[in-house]
Image (cartoon, grey):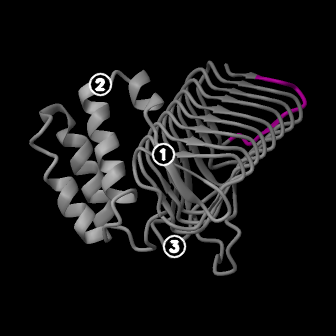
Amino acid sequence: MAQIHPTALVDPHAELHDSVSVGPFTTIGPHVRIGEGTTVGAHCTIEGHTTIGAHNRIYQFASLGADPQDKKYKGEPTQLIIGNGNTIREFTTFNTGTVQDKGLTQIGNDNWIMAYVHVAHDCVIGDDNVIANGVQFAGHVLVGHHTLIGGMSGVHQFVRIGDFAMCGFQTRLSQDLPPFVMAAGNPAQAQNVHQEGPRRKGYTSQRLTVLKQMYKLLYRKGLTLDAASKEIEALKGQVPEAAPDVDMMLDFLAQAQRGIVR
């Protein structure tokens, strides 16, 4: 049996793995599923059609699976899906999706999400991200993998953040932030190439050099986005191991509907 504190209110239709623990005064709704080894702290509310994977640690006062803050929402059974191994700190709020998108808000695996973070409807957050205190994601935001989002930053709806991107403290991000780029400011401006994250993941010096070359072509040569993309494509054959990074950058730039941080 799951370890449920006697003051917690867990709907009998909720599906909890036997190894789940639930703290005092927490409320869990009927359409909630929680996987192996996940711990839920005190005074949490988990509701809606919410699925939580294995070995997550959810701290006190989190609110997961509440209705989206969207006036168009009419009570449709949309979802929140959270993967495995995430740390979700105090007073975080994750909403379910809307039918105007895919009806799904999704959090990947191994994310470190600090206190007071808001993840709005239809956001998709990848794996291994560090999201600092007070970050606010508006609806439909897409976040890749291995990003660092500085505290008190705000991200406009429909913005995309590429893999290994980094936002400084109190950044206002209203345009797409390409992979491997560090940005800060209000509004956000590109600052430099983010090398430390890739380096920690085993990128070689040759591969890091290609990241720096892509950054220079985007931000230091005075090129248009189309011209920079063509120059970046020409880098693909120089360091074969960096070809996936070049492809990632080109794909990201090609899909930029809001423009990119410049």
Q: Position of residue 238 (x, y in %)?
A: 12, 39
Q: Position of residue 245 (x, y in %)?
A: 26, 42
Q: Is residue 64 visible?
A: no
Q: Write the start and end of the magenta stretch as one range.
A: 4-12
Q: CA distance from mark 1 to mark 3?
A: 38 Å
Q: Position of residue 215 (x, y in %)?
A: 36, 49
Q: Is residue 94 left or right of residue 53?
A: right
Residue at left offset 54%, top offset 27% = 85
Residue 197 lies, with reference to residue 115, above or below; the image says above
In the image, which is nearer the foreground, mark 2 or mark 3? 2
Q: Is residue 8 visible?
A: yes
Q: Which residue is mark 1?
A: 192
Foreground residue among 213 and 95: 213
First in sequence: mark 1 vs mark 2: 1
Q: Which residue is mark 3?
A: 99
First in sequence: mark 2 vs mark 3: 3
Within 10 Å of disc 2 (Cα), the crowding (few <14, some 14-19, many 20+) is few
Q: Does the magenta segment cover residue 230?
A: no
Amino acid, disc 1: Asn
